[in-house]
Amino acid sequence: MSKDELKPEESKNDHRAIGEALDLFSFHEVAPGTAFWHGKGMIIFRELEKLIRGELDQVGYEEISTPIMVKKEVFEKSGHAKYYRENMFELEDGDQTYFLKPMNCPESTYVYGSRIRSYKDLPLRLSEIGRLHRNELSGVLGGLFRARQFTMDDAHIYLRPDQIQGEVSSLLKLVTKVYAIFGFSPKFYLSTMPDKAMGDKKAWEKAEEALEMALKENGVKHELKEKDGAFYGPKIDIEIKDSLGRSWQLATIQLDLLMLPEQFGLTYIDEEGKKQKPMVIHRAVYGSFERFIGVLLEHFEGALPLWLSPVQAVVLPVSEKFTGYGKKVFDELKNAGIRVEISDANETLGKRIREAEVRKIPYVIVVGEREESGDFVNVRRRGSKDNTEVKVSELISRIKKEIEERAL
Ligand SMILES: [Zn+2]
């Protein structure tokens, strides 16, 4: 049976199969549609968090964290209780009804509204790595691609109308920069005012013009999706193509001209001391961490870039006699902050090398007689057929440089 004939769930390149082979996560009947993350999978999660947090710290975000479970009145105000109820998990506690949040937006308004905001405070960029629950039907659940619980790299940016272009422009830079790290060159789509839009036409026109200017300013080509905006504002959809030629829409920049501020009575004080309504940008870069990781695993066929690899190097002593030297090499790499393992010498070397290949470990380091007496190591980089002999210190600087650059 060729690979093409396999059903997706049987394919070796399915992220669920990769996740199992690499010990990243598992799924269990006790929690349908929700991953149990293992230690190695959490390393990928944490590296992605570190990357996005590092970027956001540089461009003036405040990271917030809001409750997973809130009273239903929050989602009555936002309209979710009416239009999205079948997708929400509901809990009763006495005479009180609670919901598990399916999105972060309504709750972020409570942080905004907890202070009097002046025009000088805007844009206020509230980011949140928020855990969300949506009651997807079990028939449509699909590993990490469609889960009932997932984690979003979300943000809500509260701003004045005159700040739209500048803010969207810096968001386009952020998305382009982050995606380039994974080797993705995104495509951009601008969705404009639909027929059933809310709000006045002038505000829409101005907002669409600002989005277009931001795209132009960044030299970003885009396609138009006419009348495809949400009823409360225009948006930019961002799509990538993976190594299998599939398109994924992960990031979005959605402008909210009036809805959220109206529902939750948000205001700021303008230069003349008058109350005004802010606008909001909802945006995500990865979208859902879970789905993003699923896409990465299939895109790279499990062979993640070094900086994302749960195990970055493995030391293989050729026989038990060289375990001592192997341990010394292992300690040096470990102390340098590299995620390294050392293997027992009780299997044949050939078998252990093959196993390291199956586990897609980027650096395979072999040590034996020659290496110990010369105080060097024999290294093979994943994907290369050549072995090189290097001093451990040299290998460490090479690996650290590759990690630091987040090289592909
Ligand atoms: Zn939102």
Image (cartoon, rainbow, N blue to C red):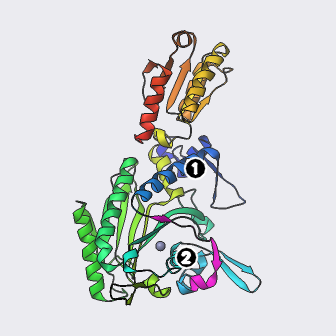
Residue 96, position as x, y percentages in the image: 71, 84
Give the side of residue 201 with respect to residue 47, left or right.
Answer: left
Q: Nearer the viewer, residue 257 or 250?
A: 257
Q: Is residue 68 magenta?
A: yes
Residue 114, position as x, y percentages in the image: 53, 80
- Looking at numbered disc 2 in the image, what kind of residue is underneath it? Glu
Q: Is residue 323 magenta?
A: no
Can residue 137 be seen from the camera position used here?
yes
- Looking at numbered disc 1 in the image, what kind of residue is underneath it? Arg
| Quarter holding residue 198 | bottom left
Q: Which residue is mark 2?
A: 107
Which numbered dot is residue 287? none
Can residue 81 be seen from the camera position used here?
no
Q: Nearer the viewer, residue 351 or 42?
A: 42
Q: Which residue is mark 1?
A: 16
Residue 408, position as x, y percentages in the image: 40, 40
